[in-house]
Image (cartoon, rainbow, N blue to C red):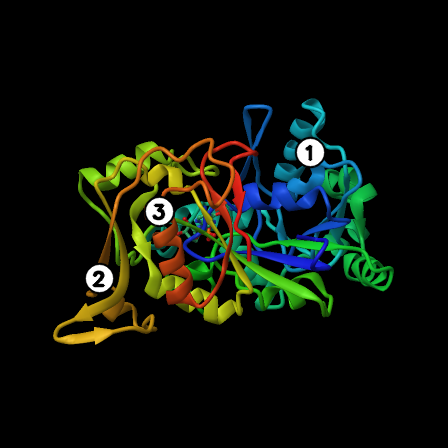
């Protein structure tokens, strides 16, 4: 893909946990820079390396490739002690192969933020990860936050001293990269439906998870950018808040079991439901998606029928556009299009070889969202990705 496009942004197009880690892993071997631009260690990007699942929380997963420079941009919030633990884990397992750079402008998550997040009724209502993310951003916007550079200048914090070798002006670093025609991969965290502006507010995270966050959170004006949305063939959500197509029955449990839908950061079971195309079309529009990676279609194998939501109904009204009102979202009933199920698709390595039922499903997603599917996931391993000819 990098042969065609200079820079790529990988953006979660559902409620997080779409499989961005796998896509970033696939693309980062050809990238010069891999950049996180928002969020913090609430993220959990899982990559399967030699059959072992490794969850990255703060460090961009591009770090496993020798020639990459992995950046935590100014838009990220950073917990120094947890970051040090992650670095030491990666070093122990010989996975810290690329370079790491941390923005001196990034804001720091303190133990006070974590305590507030664990105790506050709002966090409890939302079902946050409890990592202090929201409260670090509250202090940032309230102009009383502590930045990495501030801690460094104070010279008292041992953790930040240990991170000093990685700290620099990452915006300037990336500008240089752009001038030298380097390839940048932006690794979005969480998902569009958790975006502070466009998500299901207030049941959201506290950062801009949509593509707009990239410019402010990395400090670069990227011209040649391909925006790749990542979605699963069904939806999941951790924490509270509306999930219109949620399956609260045995089918939901089956999806969770088969998809191994448990949080990489908190271990919490994820709520599961049918693919919501109303939400996905909205994500396509908000992010201006250029292409889609549609993952975990193997998890749907063996279902007699597979459903996708194509509209919502509230009272007697049929809604096609994703509503802003949380009150409406909590009351909507999805209208489904039903597809016949498909058999085992693991091991298939070309689009042509996929069963007709899967191709019909994928083509319907493309028609509905007006975005081309370019990557298809049909298994948990690195190799289980099919490139769809465009
Ligand atoms: P916070 O980001 O910890 O403040 O949590 C806010 C909401 O975002 C909660 O519903 C979390 O479960 C959700 N969330 C945060 N990070 C992730 C993620 O990486 N994947 C999925 N959900 C997340």
Counting every numbered tag in the picture gives: 3
Q: Characterize the local packing of mark 1: few (<14), some (14-19) or many (20 or more) Cα atoms within 10 angstroms.
A: some
Which residue in the protein does label 2 denote?
Answer: 334
| Residue 352 visible in the picture | yes
Residue 30 higher or lower than 330, as above or below: above
Residue to which mark 1 is pinned:
87
Q: Nearer the viewer, residue 364 or 257?
A: 364
Q: Earlier in the sequence, mark 2 or mark 3?
A: 2
Q: CA distance from mark 2 to mark 1?
A: 44 Å
Foreground label between 2 and 1: 2
Q: Position of residue 247 (x, y in %)?
A: 22, 47
Q: Separation of disc 3 and disc 1 at Cα?
A: 45 Å
Is there CB contact under 8 Å for labels 2 and 3?
Answer: no
Seen as rendered, the residue at the extreme front is 352
* Left or right of 160 on screen, residue 197: left
Residue under label 3, please give it.
356
Residue 317 vs residue 188, the one in the foreground: 317
């Amino acid at each position: 893909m990098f042969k065609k496009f200079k820079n790529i942004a990988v953006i979660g197009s559902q409620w997080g946990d779409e499989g961005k880690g796998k896509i970033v892993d696939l693309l980062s071997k050809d990238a010069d820079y891999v950049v996180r631009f928002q969020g913090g260690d609430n993220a959990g990007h899982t990559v399967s390396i030699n059959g072992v699942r490794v969850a990255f929380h703060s460090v961009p997963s591009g770090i496993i490739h020798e020639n990459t420079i992995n950046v935590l941009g100014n838009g990220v919030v950073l917990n120094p002690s947890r970051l040090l633990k992650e670095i030491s884990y990666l070093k122990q397992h010989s996975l810290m192969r690329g370079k790491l750079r941390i923005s001196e402008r990034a804001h720091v998550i303190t133990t006070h933020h974590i305590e507030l997040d664990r105790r506050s009724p709002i966090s409890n209502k939302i079902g946050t990860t409890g990592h202090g993310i929201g409260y670090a951003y509250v202090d940032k916007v309230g102009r009383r936050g502590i930045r990495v550079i501030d801690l460094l200048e104070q010279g008292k914090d041992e953790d930040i001293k240990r991170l000093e070798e990685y700290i620099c002006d990452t915006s300037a670093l990336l500008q240089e990269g752009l001038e030298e025609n380097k390839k940048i991969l932006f690794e979005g965290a969480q998902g569009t439906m958790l975006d502070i502006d466009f998500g299901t507010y207030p049941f959201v995270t506290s950062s801009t998870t949509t593509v707009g966050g990239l410019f402010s959170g990395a400090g670069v004006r990227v011209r040649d950018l391909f925006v790749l949305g990542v979605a699963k063939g069904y939806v999941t959500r951790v924490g509270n808040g509306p999930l219109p197509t949620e399956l609260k029955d045995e089918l939901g449990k089956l999806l969770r079991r088969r998809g191994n839908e448990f949080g990489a950061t908190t271990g919490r079971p994820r709520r599961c439901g049918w693919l919501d195309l109303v939400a996905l079309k909205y994500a396509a529009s908000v992010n201006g998606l250029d292409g889609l990676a549609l993952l975990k279609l193997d998890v749907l194998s063996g279902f007699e029928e597979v459903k996708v939501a194509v509209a919502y109904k509230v009272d007697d009204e049929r809604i096609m556009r994703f509503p802003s009102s949380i009150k409406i979202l909590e009351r909507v009933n999805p209208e489904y299009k039903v597809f016949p199920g498909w058999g085992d698709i693991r091991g298939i390595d070309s689009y042509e070889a996929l069963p007709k039922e899967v191709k019909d499903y994928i083509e319907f997603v493309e028609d509905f969202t007006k975005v081309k599917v370019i990557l298809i996931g049909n298994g948990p391993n690195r190799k289980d990705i099919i490139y769809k000819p465009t």
